Image (cartoon, coloured by chain):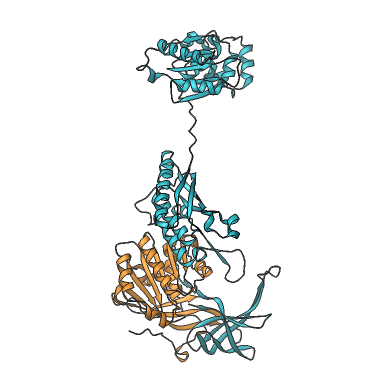
Chain colours: A orange, B cyan
Amino acid sequence: MANTTCFVRAAQLKELHEPKELLSLSKLRFLKGLARGAITEITGPRSSGRTSLALYILAQATQAGEVCAVVDLNNNFHPESAALAGVRLEQLIWVRCGGNAEHAIRAADLLLHAGGFGVVLLDLSEATPRVLNRLPISYWYRFRQAVEHTPTVFLVCATSSQCKSSSTKRIELKVKAFHWTGAAPFLLLRGIESEANLHKARAIQPQILSLVA
Amino acid sequence: MFACIHIPGEAALNSELLALAHEFSPEVEEAAVNAVLFSIDGLRKLIGSPYQIASEICRAGYARKLKGNLGIASNPDAALLLARNCTGVTLVTTGEEAEKLAPIPVTSLFAHKATLDSGLLEVLRRWGLKTCGDLAALPETGVAERLGNAGIYLQNLARGKIDRPLHIPAPVTNYEERMELEHPLDLLEPLLFLLGRALGELCKRLRSQSRAARILKARFTLEAHQLEAHQLEAHQEYQCELEFPVPLDESHTLLKLLQLHLERHPPEAPITAFVLRVEPAEPRRVQGGFFLPPTPPADKLQITLARIAGMVGKENAGTPQLLNTHRPDAFQMGALRVGGIENAETKEPRQQEVLRLAMRLFRPALQARVRVSESAPKNIVARGVKGNVIRAAGPWKTSGEWWASTSWIREEWDVVLDDGALYRIYREVETREWYLHGIYD
């Protein structure tokens, strides 16, 4: 299946000047039930909250004392955002691959085989469809085998689903609205509202994620 | 039973004395200048009774032309006191120590233990005590009340009742292995075979001393005629130093890390000799727990990180550390502190009520062409990003570190493009150039 980037038309964006009531994350049932020893995908277009959600999961894991790793294909990881999200950076290994997809895949493979990690995040969010289409699907089977029977949550962030049948869950995010305060030209960004859909699991209603700037 | 040999008034005979003592026991304490202590318990089956052992020691001393005193007692301190204060051979059976020590002056107790307060000697003199027998005859409770712990110790010393093990200095271990090769080696595989053997020896020594390697230093001598003339001086030797976050004592882990280093930075010529040296440190001791979160095994993690660093570069794998500055994207990569992880307090994760909006940065920032209208950006074109601005917030002016080469002055904007994404762009005030800094995601 071809990789497609999900773009949201500007006209579809519902911009609100006043933020809605923030939903509690504890209501997001799928976050509590991230499967260990399995692959979970977070997909969505730019600004849909993929990174924020991944950092939230990393923060939960590192605060529980687990060691986590980020394999960053395009060197996009922002340590300051991670620290603000609550990630304990001293328990995080960051591998910058400089756009080399082969290095990213091999680094993720080495980390999964080393074992003992709480969360391993493979960030392919900024990878072009050309790069993603070159990744053989056998890699994802290999990853599924490597992570099986381990306590590791293997997260894959991308614009569209990559792991196909190898992942056990997929969280699809769609941007719904941007929140601003003030009147033009004196606007201030307050946050983003995204819709999260859970695939490959018990059907639940789409959840609204509020990302606060 | 312990024997003490003391040579009064002589100097620089310690080595002779030690050699004499080592003829009878491998464990010898250098109790004082020209005085050695050793156990004779193991000699009973070899030589016989304490009298025969004393006779044998005297014979060996005479053969070495040493003239001194020999004291044999059931504890080391009594043997030492007898050797230092009684001429010739003094042999005391168990239970007779107090009687034999009784005529020895009290002052010799203070010479025996230098750390004793000399004020006590003045007190004992005022009390009219001259010999060990006088001190031993005093009631214990009274001595304890008036002189405290030091008084009790002195009295027990005078009675010959202090039993202690010998203070044996730990042998100095050499953590170095060197090997001269008959033929120069230019392939890594046969070299690794030899390195593995040397590392195995080093690790065996480390484990025997309950130590582990913190730093591994390797020095390789290169074949001279394979080097260019200008390389001869600087590159006749190839050195590398591997520092481990967690001390290691497994030879195969050390070998793998050394192999990864040599594969990344191979020597420039065949190797004719090598020296491996490790710096010992306290090994890592971790109390595991059933409910503790899983952590990667330290040795496996180090090999994994070394492999990844070999692939993506050392500067691209590690732990991010934020710098104490307001400069955008200020961080440095550091080594993972495995010890810190294992000691990290594990607490129930704090449930956040909201998700913090994160950023993804373009490194380096993408140069952009921005069309500005009414002081606000209206259209942006950069590599991989193109669109009309449908909402913009800014400019937010930031600057800092004007005193350093890392200074910055910029105007930042948060813009929503018609591709549906929210970007941060900025304009350098000095150059008036626009850049795409990152994406809110």
Q: Residue at x 43, y 20 (%)?
A: B24
**Image height check: is A193 above or below B93?**
below
- Residue B159 in view here: no
| Residue found at the far front of this picture | B225
What quarter of the picture does the N terminus of chain B occupy? top left
Residue B364 lies, in percent from the top left, at: 56, 76
Residue B274 or residue A88, whichever sits in front = B274
* Residue nearer the viewer, B352 or B277: B277
Pick whichever, A152 or A186, lies toward us.
A152
Relative to B167, say whether A67 is above or below: below
Residue B155 x, y percent position in the rendering? 52, 16
Q: Out of B206 and B210, give the one closest to the viewer.
A: B206
Is residue A140 in view from this perspective? yes
In this rendering, the answer to whether B89 lies above or below B441 is above
Q: Which residue is at 61% across, 11% downward?
A: B127
The residue under the point 37% across, 72% down is A28
Give how far across and how far down residue B167 sits, in percent.
49, 27
Q: Is residue A41 found left or right of B127 in the rendered image?
A: left
